[in-house]
Image (spheres, grey):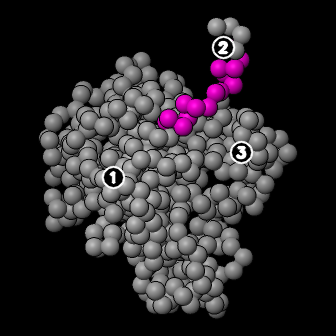
Amino acid sequence: MEHLPESAAEYLQGHRLDEVECIVSDLPGIARGKAVPASKFARQAQFFLPNSIYFQTITGGWGEAAGEDGFTEPDMVLKPDMSTARAAPWTADWTLQVIHDAFDQAGEPIAFAPRNVLKRVVELYRKEGWEPVVAPEMEFYLVARNINPAEEIAPMMGRSGRPAAARQAYSMSAVDEFGPVIDDIYDFAEDMGFEIDGITQEGGAGQLEINLRHGDPVKLADEIFYFKRLIREAALRHDCFATFMAKPIEGEPGSAMHVHHSVVDTKTGKNIFTGARGAETDAFFHFIAGLQNHMPSVVALIAPYVNSYRRYVKDHAAPINLEWGRDNRTTGIRVPISDAASRRVENRLAGMDCNPYLGIAASLACGYLGLKERKRPTKEFKGDAYEGVEEIPRDLFSALDLFKDAKKIHDVLHPEFARVYRIVKTAEYDEFLQVISPWEREHLLLNV
């Protein structure tokens, strides 16, 4: 097969390719597609899936998002991006995965396909002579196998035979507890050509963080999309689950997808956040202001489920507002310590449960509007931002209400995407309201 990335070619060296998984990301970030024999893939330039995969809720229900034409499920045309070809090293045979881009039958990009949403935002930057750069961080939990949804999620057993301990952030001994799983994560990542910048133990019981090298937003979103599957497969080999829920265990910290941002001038190759003498530029402050002014409108994208809002709890390692500060992890917007050339802005709001394409697109969209509007942010916050005013919607319904009226954001992401996303997420919320929780049975059954 021609034009394979180096990592895929190395993986297959001396072996015959058996199968190709042709995949796209749906709204939640689940890989959808078809597995085809390698010989068939070599003969096809495209394949087809119904556009209804983007109207489906996380439970498999359907939002009424088909539009004026009704629910006719027309086919989309899916074309491979061969630069994304990666090994699937956990499979029994020699298999590659290839991410595809979605088009309608007239050749136009499907507006509500998450990868297309991110591509659209990146292209808006490029039209201004800017190249956005991101570096995401991925937090997740390794937990005991959970077969019965009625049972609480528990930490996994480590090598010592004891459950993973909490409050052990940055402990190397804690990382060693998950050594066999981490070894497989590294091995799978190497087979797929991904470079991990580091793995650390976080504050939760069995909570880990993986940092990725900075780069092109679409490429990094592809990597996170692949990494979620890779990590899950590594965990299953060792009788545990990997979960990217925002708040899987009561009383433990939530899992975030922090995103570091910088923007490069395409003509000079210089970071637009830094001036000639190394000082912070107006563009640096405009970007921060864009996050402050527009992030509330996109919380429904970066916190897409009812569980997501359990993460935004005071003093639990997640922000409760949009204050900004230098080297301050209590703020929603943090400016890390760096040299002038590497000056960047960290958005700490997104949960790890968000679709990586949509989470990064939402954050970049807010920064883009900030650069265009040229407003100033609030005064830098000094001290503990948990003492500040809460500014983040507390539930999905409130977040969707803000998103519904955010016309500027709709224009950046695409109005048709905004329409479909809001309808699907509202349908999910309505499904959730049909479920009676243990808390309601315990406290309301006999007391009200």
**Looking at the rendered structure, which numbered label has been put on residue 143?**
3
Q: Earlier in the sequence, mark 2 or mark 3?
A: 3
Instruction: Tell me the residue at 54%/37% (across/down).
Output: 431
Q: Earlier in the sequence, mark 3 or mark 1?
A: 1
Task: Confirm or deny contact between disc 2 and disc 1 (CB under 8 A).
Answer: no
**Residue 31: % across, % down:** 53, 62
Query: Eyeballing the image, is 290 above or below 322?
Result: below
Image quarter (top left, top right, bottom left or bottom right) of the C terminus: top right
Residue linked to disc 2? 444
Q: Choose mark 3 or mark 1, whichever is in front.
A: 1
Instruction: Tell me the residue at 71%/45% (across/down).
Output: 143
Q: Is residue 169 visible?
A: no
Q: Measure the C-alpha gap from mark 2 to mark 1.
A: 40 Å
**Looking at the rendered structure, which numbered label has been put on residue 67?**
1
Q: Choose mark 2 or mark 3, whichever is in front.
A: 2
Q: Is residue 445 magenta?
A: no
Dominant secondary structure (helix, strand or loop) of the stretch shown in magenta = helix
Instruction: Tell me the residue at 64%/27% (across/down).
Output: 436
